[in-house]
Image (spheres, grey):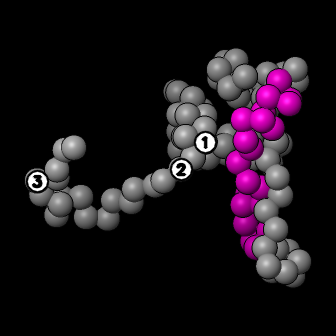
């Protein structure tokens, strides 16, 4: 394991612990892209194929979704994406994923 020699140089860095599938697909979406577009593509995947996120109360869920609509869905599982395999490439191309749609499939 590599040890950090001077942690002060990394002030403000945030290390994420994302699920491997989400990390892989976000990386595929990142090819020749900017950060806002990558985020948009990842959010589209979640909205199209993920499960709705339900908070403790319907009122709380509605409040959060009103302010942050992109946070309303969990990232899809491999099973959810596999269930949509026949339509996945065409739908993602319609959603402006371009050539990346072939790699998500």
| Residue at mark 3 to residue at mark 2: CA–CA distance | 25 Å
Closer to the camera in the image, 84 or 45: 84
Checking the image for residue 18, the label placed there is 2
Q: On screen, 92 above or below 55?
A: above
Q: Earlier in the sequence, mark 3 or mark 2?
A: 3
Checking the image for residue 5, the label placed there is 3
Residue at screen point 79% across, 79% down? 56
Closer to the camera in the image, 27 or 3: 3
Q: Residue 26, how many percent across, how many down?
A: 58, 38
Badge 2 local density, few (<14 within 10 Å), some, or many (20+)? few
Give the image quarter of residue 72.
bottom right
| Residue at mark 2 to residue at mark 1: CA–CA distance | 7 Å
Determine if the magenta segment contains residue 69. Answer: yes
Q: Residue 30, how many percent across, how many down?
A: 54, 33
Q: Residue 62, how many percent across, how many down?
A: 85, 74
Magenta range: 64-85
* Label 1 sits on residue: 22
Query: Mark 2 and 1 residues: CB-CB less than 8 Å, in contact?
Result: yes
Q: Residue 37, how many percent across, how many down?
A: 62, 41
Residue at screen point 65% across, 20% down? 103
| Whether residue 105 can be seen here | yes
Q: On screen, 70 above or below 95?
A: below
Determine if the magenta segment contains residue 63. Answer: no
Residue at screen point 66% across, 43% down? 42
């Amino acid at each position: 394991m590599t040890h950090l020699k001077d942690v002060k140089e990394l002030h403000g860095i945030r290390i994420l612990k994302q699920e491997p599938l989400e990390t892989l697909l976000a990386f595929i979406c990142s090819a020749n892209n900017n950060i806002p577009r990558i985020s948009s593509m990842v959010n589209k995947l979640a909205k199209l194929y993920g499960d709705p996120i339900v908070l403790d109360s319907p009122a709380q869920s509605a409040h959060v979704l009103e302010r942050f609509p992109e946070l309303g869905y969990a990232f899809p599982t491999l099973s959810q994406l596999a269930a949509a395999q026949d339509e996945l490439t065409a739908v993602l191309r319609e959603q402006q994923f371009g050539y990346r749609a072939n790699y998500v499939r």
